Image (spheres, grey):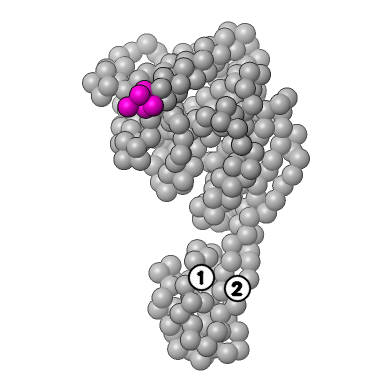
Amino acid sequence: MRLAVLSGKGGTGKTTVAVNLALSLAPHRQTTYVDYDVEEPNGFIFLHPQIRTTSTVFLPYPKINGACTLCGKCSEACQYHALAVVGDQVLVFPELCHGCGTCGIVCPVGAVDEVKRPLGQIDEGERGGLQCLQGVLKEGESLSGPVIRELRHHEKGHTSQVEEVVVADCPPGSSCSVIHSAEGSDLALLVTEPTLFGLHDLKIAVRLMREMGLDFGIIINKDDGGPLIREYCTIEDITLLGSIPFDLEIAKIYSRGLNLMHEPKWDDLFKMLSERIVTEVNQRRAGGERA
């Protein structure tokens, strides 16, 4: 079972939901928490896992050797403008290179060699039986895609049984990074706030899920009991999976870098939420089998 936790924008409480949901599931099911928000991973701040291994993610980029005839075919073919023929040399801009290898394919004289540069890293650890993975994009880099792809590869290496649970803490927004980290999930959990800004970005996330063909439901964070999100769910026929109340105590716990499962009240809330989500996934699976 794979659960993707998303939000239309940052700061809605996505990581709060993902971390505490993983902690509530771990005592009962083999569970893996994966932080795909590689530009700003913060799940480990609250989980404090024991890091077992760290591996570097590399990206290849071209290096022009002495066989170059300055024909310019490599720079013409590069859609990312990572190469340019200037005077009697070919300039390479590694930060713009996406590692596609097109320049090497089109070069007629084999003047393009590949070298690698570190783009980020994958950390693997454990906390009390909960398996923990995170991707970290190197400072100054902008290409999160290769790190996310490598993280998906590591996730698959951790999960081999059908009944295992993966809680994927996805990036905010609706970019390609979100798509790559959410695809293939059994259920997407869209975390939102009961504000007009929250509703605006929630609609974007809902449209993305429908275009991807993913089952999804909504969780309201900082719930003040208002009708804004509930009315939207009713109109759009979207399942409201649960809510987390607007409570100053939660903010205080969060500010200390702790998870909510330390407090019995919030422990019970997330246990009920996790049971509701598991039931929802099983019901949808059964409905799909009957169809």
**Residues under numbered marks 2 and 1 in contact, where contact means CB atoms less than 8 Å apart:** yes
Q: Is residue 94 above or below residue 86?
A: above
Q: Is residue 55 above or below residue 201?
A: below
Decide which of 65, 165 is in the foreground and name it.
Answer: 165
Q: Quarter holding the C terminus?
A: top left
**In the rendering, at what x and y percent does residue 75 appear?**
44, 78
Main secondary structure type of the part rendered in magenta: helix
Callout 2 amino acid: Glu
Residue shown at 38% from the left, 30% from the top: 215
Q: Residues within 10 Å of mark 2 (few under 14, many from 20)?
A: few
The answer to whether residue 290 is magenta is yes
Find disc 1 in the rendering and name its residue: 101
**In the rendering, at what x and y percent does residue 102 appear?**
47, 72
Q: Is residue 10 above or below residue 145?
A: above
**In the rendering, at what x and y percent does residue 220 appear?**
41, 20
Decide which of 8, 54 is in the foreground and name it.
Answer: 54
Decide which of 290, 7 is in the foreground and name it.
Answer: 290
Q: Residues within 10 Å of mark 1 (few under 14, many from 20)?
A: some
Q: Quadrant of residue 224?
A: top left
Callout 1 amino acid: Gly
Find disc 2 in the rendering and name its residue: 114
Q: Which residues are magenta?
A: 287-291
Residue shown at 38% from the left, 35% from the top: 214
Q: CA distance from mark 2 to mark 1?
A: 8 Å
Residue shown at 63% from the left, 18% from the top: 28
Residue shown at 35% from the left, 24% from the top: 290
